[in-house]
């Protein structure tokens, strides 16, 4: 009789473990691939002086650095949320760090779009406006602005009376929505998100329109303007995906209400890859494939194949 009870107990536990492993594989494999690509890209951007000293690549390094950390933290939160329940203080620290990294991407995309606008529309002033010093100042302002947002959220969070809670152990998964412990925090998050993405979208669109108008001028480099327009369109697409990532948890909750558990899990995995992982790897793909300076060096380190060494030497000679 005890053997039957043991089998009935182990059976659901084994099925739960198997379901956990099967659900983690579609998330873990793409995540590791994306982190590897971003890591190689970061190493590539520090491997040559021309990449370390060019302002456009310095901004790209800042973008990839924040995206890689955010992707790693998102994966950690995913594993923690499906396995254990965190306390409010631990979850709060992880979520605040996630907020800090998440805002770096749209802000850096804005600066990169403005850099392309100046390069095409004001080529004679580009070298005096876009300098290493100004780029360092822009990156400092980006991190300071994101840190100010985190500080504001922290103040609103500490305003909540935690002693009213029966326990600091969370009953729900650790997520940004779970940390909206008072209505003011939720209202601030909504207003801040609208302001950030509307401002970023308007800036990228305005840069695209400016580059398009400049392309009609006889004095403008047509090839450079065409490439800049394509880059700005990709930035706008990437910005849209990052905006969708803010809707991930509400979408998952809404889906789980209207469909069965298996379908909800499959849709959750698909949404996680598309709106959480993909935007954080697009920068490496956009610049790693399209940029003639980065591509041969990236392929050399990414594939570790000797046949790229000839192309690499040619790229060094051309730069």
Image: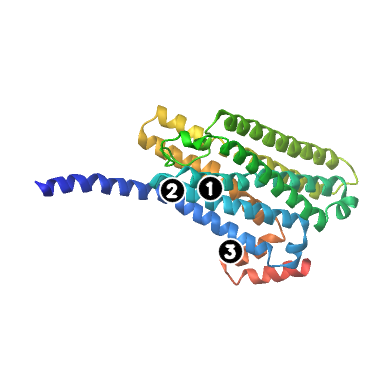
Q: Which residue is mark 1?
A: 94
> How busy is the neighbourhood of tag 3: few (under 14 within 10 Å), some, or many (20 plus)?
some
- CB under 8 Å between callouts 1 and 2? yes
207 left or right of 274?
A: right
The secondary structure type at the circle numbered 2 is helix
Q: Position of residue 134 (x, y in %)?
A: 81, 53
Residue at image coords 50%, 52%: 31
Which numbered disc, 1 or 2, marks the residue that appears first in the sequence?
2
Which numbered disc, 2 or 3, marks the residue that appears first in the sequence?
2
Front-lying residue, 88 or 226: 88
Residue at image coords 45%, 32%: 253
- In this view, the mark in front (1 or 2): 1
- In this view, the mark in front (2 or 3): 2
Tell me the CA gap for discs 2 and 3.
Answer: 30 Å
Q: Which residue is mark 3?
A: 302
Give the quadrant of the C terminus. bottom right
Q: Picture quarter containing residue 310?
A: bottom right
Residue at image coords 17%, 48%: 7
> How busy is the neighbourhood of tag 1: few (under 14 within 10 Å), some, or many (20 plus)?
some
Tell me the CA gap for discs 3 and 1.
Answer: 31 Å
> Looking at the rendered structure, which numbered label has been put on residue 147?
none
> Looking at the rendered structure, which numbered label has been put on residue 80?
2
> How busy is the neighbourhood of tag 2: few (under 14 within 10 Å), some, or many (20 plus)?
some
The secondary structure type at the circle numbered 3 is helix
């Amino acid at each position: 009789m005890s053997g039957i009870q043991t089998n009935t107990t182990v059976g659901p536990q084994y099925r739960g473990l198997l379901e956990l492993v099967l659900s983690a594989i579609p998330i873990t494999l793409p995540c590791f691939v994306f982190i590897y690509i971003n890591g190689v890209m970061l190493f590539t951007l520090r491997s040559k002086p021309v990449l370390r000293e060019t302002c456009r690549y310095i901004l790209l390094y800042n973008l990839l650095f924040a995206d890689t950390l955010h992707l790693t933290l998102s994966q950690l939160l995913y594993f923690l949320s499906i396995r254990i329940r965190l306390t409010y203080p631990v979850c709060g620290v992880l979520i605040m760090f996630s907020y800090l990294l998440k805002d770096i991407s749209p802000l850096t995309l804005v600066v990169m779009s403005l850099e392309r606008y100046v390069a095409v529309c004001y080529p004679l002033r580009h070298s005096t406006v876009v300098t290493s010093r100004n780029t360092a100042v822009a990156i400092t302002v980006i991190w300071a602005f994101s840190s100010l947002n985190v500080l504001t959220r922290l103040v609103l969070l500490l305003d909540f009376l935690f002693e009213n809670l029966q326990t600091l152990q969370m009953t729900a998964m650790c997520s940004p929505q779970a940390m909206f412990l008072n209505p003011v925090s939720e209202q601030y998050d909504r207003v801040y998100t609208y302001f950030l993405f509307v401002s970023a979208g308007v800036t990228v669109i305005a840069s695209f329109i400016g580059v398009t108008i400049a392309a009609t001028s006889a004095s403008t480099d047509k090839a450079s303007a065409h490439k800049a327009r394509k880059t700005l369109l990709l930035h706008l697409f990437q910005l849209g995906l990052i905006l969708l990532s803010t809707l991930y948890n509400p979408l998952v909750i809404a889906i789980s209400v209207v469909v069965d558990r298996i379908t909800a899990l499959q849709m959750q995995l698909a949404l996680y890859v598309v709106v959480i992982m993909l935007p954080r790897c697009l920068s490496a793909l956009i610049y790693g494939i399209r940029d003639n300076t980065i591509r041969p060096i990236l392929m050399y380190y990414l594939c570790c194949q000797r046949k790229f060494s000839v192309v690499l030497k040619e790229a060094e000679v051309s730069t």
